[in-house]
Image (cartoon, coloured by chain):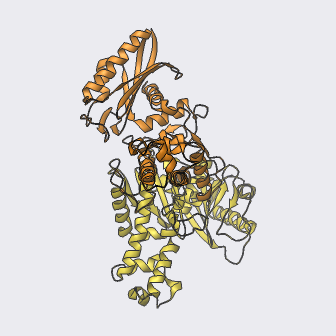
Chain colours: A yellow, B orange
Amino acid sequence: MTEVLAGVDLGGTSVKVALANHDGVLLCDESFSTDGHLGASDVIERIGSLLAQLAKQHGVSIKAVGMGVPGLVDIDNGVTKFLPNLPGQWRDVPVAEQLRGLLACSVRVANDARTATLGELQFGHGRHRPDATLAFFTLGTGVGGGVVVQGQLRLGPLGAAGELGHQTILPDGPRCGCGNRGCLETLASGLAIASEGIRLMKSGLAPHLHALVDGDASRVTVAEMTQVIKQDNSIHEAITAASTYIGIAAANVVTILHPDLIVLGGGVAEIGDLLIETVKRVIDERVRMFPTSNVQVMKSELGVKAGVMGAVALAMDAL
Amino acid sequence: MTEVLAGVDLGGTSVKVALANHDGVLLCDESFSTDGHLGASDVIERIGSLLAQLAKQHGVSIKAVGMGVPGLVDIDNGVTKFLPNLPGQWRDVPVAEQLRGLLACSVRVANDARTATLGELQFGHGRHRPDATLAFFTLGTGVGGGVVVQGQLRLGPLGAAGELGHQTILPDGPRCGCGNRGCLETLASGLAIASEGIRLMKSGLAPHLHALVDGDASRVTVAEMTQVIKQDNSIHEAITAASTYIGIAAANVVTILHPDLIVLGGGVAEIGDLLIETVKRVIDERVRMFPTSNVQVMKSELGVKAGVMGAVALAMDAL
């Protein structure tokens, strides 16, 4: 029977799974919702049975599973430590052991941003540069990240290195969910940008945004803001300000590691050119100690598939 | 004849040279002044003849030379690119080629902070941890640095990675010599700290410092300020503020790389406990995404010898 790899991307509200061959070509992918207060063991059981069922349908056997989870993991043992945005008792769950029991194959578990970084390295912009040094910013509701040094994902003792969203950008800045102040996440996450959009809309400074969402704050996201960027000057300014903060964080990474590539992923990356061009300009303005012409700034090639493709790459790593 | 390694540390006002065996045990070290407007080729010739003379005296032959220089270097070819603090035409000087001509052995040239990092890795705190990940801050008149990831010095394409002093700490902060604003160097270099000491002294807020240096601004350095830290409260505050900025920069590096070790070297590191304890506290306060109990913060073990010992380590690398 053909052997395949499985990837699992555990999100705040849904789980995505996929089967792929060793070149990262997807056989199939599916997702299910974790709403309705599913507990951790229920979720793990559903992952196991869904993967078994998909394997059966496609007449393949699963050789290894990789799984990305939103938080801190004991990567050596595949045990979740702290998943702040997930309800349902995810502390100290031996995920790898439980999935191994269900599927009888090797399982690796890692933080989802690190996993997405691995996906970009293996199947995205990194795939023709095995020795690349790159930093991946996952710009979603929160801001995560991952760092690859000469082709090697930097994990650190807890798989926690690469938390690019929690660099201090403004030492006296807003309080962050992590406990620090002025983290990049407080200034440029999807949540931070949308909150500023709502403020501007309610202050009467963003009439086109107001028209677009019928004045409904719950409908304001970075995507809507990006749509009115050319009409509402205040929104253009807000997006530019957030992009500038991302640029400062990227410039700091360039100063420290001089990478080949800065990759921007997640929903906020859908801002597109204004984000990319601003980040490039800020790197150029702020890194003055050495020429940075080699440093490319790009949107993630894998887009919304970065998580699950990264999990497939992690499965490959498990072999 | 016994074969040895030579290290050369090119500074702003003097050159230090040393011969050492392969374990980094020094046979001898000497220095000469570069004042009096010596040109680059004069300096290189003096280095060559001094090393040849030392080798003859000790009855050894030099197998390789490593040399650290204060600025940007083309590390592949051993050509200096931009040494901002050195007079005497150091742009595009083929240092490696010239020294090779004089000494008939392999020569490697690198930035002095990267070289010092290599020294710390090979002969200092890193010597029993070949796989260590560490960040070395050289806190002198300026602030340089170097980064080691799992035992490998991160150089990047220009040998310029690891410029830890040029992270942006305050986006709208003071103008830096490099052209950026709010770099760590503008807030916590020896020059920045001493300038604040002078201001406080002249404002009448540091009477003990005033007494210590007879009110002479030219005598105020971090060393004098450290002496009165317990008497002049304003000086204690100034040193704590600078140490806090160094702590923020260190916390950012921890967030990105989760290293085993942060090493503080250079004259500012002589502040001692107040610096080390402040940096530890700031890392603890600002890195909240994962436990940082494994991260040690230490003063450089090699102290003033870090530069020349690093050059010896670089020579070893040349073989």
The x, y position of residue B43, in whole percent, is 29, 26
Q: Is residue B261 above or below residue A54?
A: above
Quadrant location of the N terminus of chain B?
Answer: top left
**Between residues B149 and A59, which one lies in front from this camera angle?**
B149
Q: Is residue A62 visible?
A: no
Q: Is residue B269 above or below residue A313?
A: above
Identity of the residue drawn at 58% across and 39% down: B132
Identity of the residue drawn at 38% across and 71% down: A240
The x, y position of residue A184, in whole percent, is 50, 64
Identity of the residue drawn at 57% across and 50% down: B279
Quadrant location of the C terminus of chain B?
Answer: top left
Q: Is residue A105 visible?
A: yes
Q: Is residue B66 above or below residue B160?
A: above
The x, y position of residue B163, in whole percent, is 42, 46
Q: Quadrant of residue B170?
A: bottom left
- Describe residue A82's horizontal placement relative to residue A260 as left or right: right
- Describe residue B38's horizontal placement relative to residue B238 as left or right: left
Identity of the residue drawn at 33% across and 32% down: B78
The x, y position of residue B15, in whole percent, is 37, 28
**Between residues B275 and A94, which one lies in front from this camera angle?**
B275
Tally of numbered discs: 0
**Between residues B150 and A181, which one lies in front from this camera angle?**
A181
- Describe residue B1's horizontal placement relative to residue A280 as left or right: right
**Between residues A26 and A306, which one lies in front from this camera angle?**
A306
